[in-house]
Amino acid sequence: MHAKSFASPPKGRIASGATAIAMLEAKPGIGGIQTLLAAEQLRQGTLVQLLPDYRWEPPTLYAIYPTRRFIPLKARLLTDALTSSLHSVSGIIPL
């Protein structure tokens, strides 16, 4: 077996996971989508996973607010809830 590599520039970018899934299901092609978002389609077989060992560079999520000294309670509660719930999601790597 010979391994070959090639470059294929992307034809476009899609910001919506649902739109990406619909496009991949509608017409043959290859696209990158988070396994978590496409779990149902993978189970149903309408999408198949290619290159299971390939991993995208994980994105970084930031919560930005004006100062650490006077963080509003709502902002603190939101960031705390997001931080604790995201740790339980498959594929999320805490810093």
Image (spheres, rainbow, N blue to C red):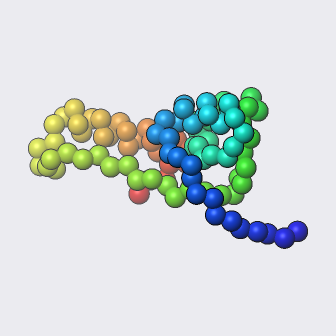
- Whether residue 62 is visible to the viewer of this picture, yes or no, is yes
The x and y percentages for residue 26 are 68, 30
Tell me where residue 86 sits by quadrant: top left
Residue at 32% of width from left, 49% of height from top?
A: 62
- Whether residue 43 is visible to the viewer of this picture, yes or no, is no
- The count of marks equals 0
Instruction: Identify the image quadrant of the C terminus.
Output: bottom left
The x and y percentages for residue 43 are 73, 32
Q: Nearer the viewer, residue 85 or 9?
A: 9
| In-image side of 14 versus 73 (left or right) | right
Q: Is residue 59 above or below residue 1?
A: above
Residue at 72% of width from left, 39% of height from top?
A: 28
The x and y percentages for residue 55 are 60, 57
Q: Is residue 7 above or below residue 32?
A: below
Residue at the right extreme, as displayed: 1
Residue at 47% of width from left, 45% of height from top?
A: 87
Residue at the left extreme, as displayed: 70
| In-image side of 74 versus 37 (left or right) | left
The x and y percentages for residue 2 are 84, 70
Q: Nearer the viewer, residue 64 or 20?
A: 20
Instruction: Identify the image quadrant of the N terminus.
Output: bottom right
Residue at 76% of width from left, 33% of height from top?
A: 45
| In-image side of 62 versus 49 (left or right) | left
Tell me where residue 5 sits by quadrant: bottom right
